[in-house]
Amino acid sequence: MSEARTRIERILDEKVRPALRAHGGEIQVDHLEDGVLYVKLLGQCAGCPSADLTNETLVEAELVKAAPELIRKVVVVQTVSDELWEQAKRLLRDHHL
């Protein structure tokens, strides 16, 4: 793991993940490119209507404040989590829609 990635993960562990986990969520770094950090929100945070607000007020604010030389912006990569896919499959399989 690169020094930059290690630093980002440490910031996430200290400043971001506790708040996300309190709501059943998680965050995963996708990649860093030209000062833009791409992340995936997972768990209950994946697809949440407040995801953009969470990114602006928590994730981006903490990372830019702690590592402005590395990160100038954070972008959420919109994906459907494996958990959500599995829930959908169970609903379809078990409820004979």
Image (cartoon, rainbow, N blue to C red):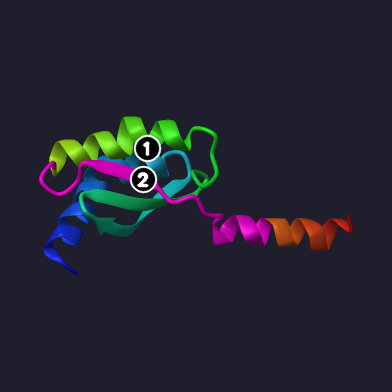
Q: Earlier in the sequence, mark 1 or mark 2?
A: 1
Question: Considering only vertical position in the picture, is 33 above or below 22?
Answer: below
Residue type at tag 1: Asn
Residue 90 part of the magenta-drawn span: no
Give left or right: position of 96 versus 4.
right
**Which residue is depicted at the point 46% across and 39% down?**
23
Q: Secondary structure at mark 1?
A: helix
The residue sitting at the bottom extreme is 1
Question: Considering only vertical position in the picture, is 58 above or below 74?
Answer: above
Residue 84 part of the magenta-drawn span: yes
Q: Are marks 1 and 2 in contact (CB under 8 Å)?
A: yes
On the image, numbered disc 2 is attached to which residue?
75
| Quadrant location of the C terminus in the rendered image | bottom right
Nearer mark to the viewer, of 1 and 2: 2
Magenta stretch bounds: 68-87
Residue type at tag 2: Val
On the image, numbered disc 1 is attached to which residue?
55
